């Protein structure tokens, strides 16, 4: 693996694990996003409601499923 390939892999993992902020918005309704789904190198952001609604279809094909919905009960 070349240094460039390794750097790209590290950047992708870091982006997928980056905490969501109050500025991240659900792609479906615009509410605050608590879930980031990575598909084919692209990201989808969802509020907890829409993540639950689409989870059964998206999770099997997701490369990463970053869920911070536990923050809602804090």
Image (cartoon, helix red, strand yellow):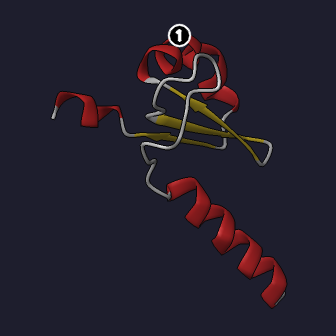
The furthest residue to the top: 53
Q: Secondary structure at mark 1?
A: helix
Residue at 55% in and 33% down: 25
Residue at 74% in and 80% down: 6
Percent position (x, y) of residue 37? 61, 37
Q: Is residue 66 above or below residue 51?
A: below
Percent position (x, y) of residue 28? 63, 18
Q: Is residue 54 above or below residue 40?
A: above
Percent position (x, y) of residue 59? 60, 27
Q: Residues within 10 Å of mark 1 (few under 14, many from 20)?
A: few
Rendering quarter of residue 27: top right
Q: Is residue 47 visible?
A: yes
- Circle 1 residue: 53
Percent position (x, y) of residue 50? 52, 15
Q: Nearer the viewer, residue 54 or 60?
A: 54
Q: Is residue 3 above or below residue 33?
A: below
Rendering quarter of residue 10: bottom right
Rendering quarter of residue 29: top right
């Amino acid at each position: 693996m070349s240094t460039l390939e390794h750097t790209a892999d590290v950047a992708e993992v870091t982006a997928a694990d980056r905490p969501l902020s109050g500025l991240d918005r659900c792609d479906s309704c615009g509410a605050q996003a608590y879930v980031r789904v990575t598909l084919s190198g692209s990201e989808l952001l969802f509020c907890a409601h829409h993540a639950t609604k689409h989870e059964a279809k998206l999770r099997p094909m997701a490369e990463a499923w970053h869920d911070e919905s536990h923050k809602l009960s804090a």
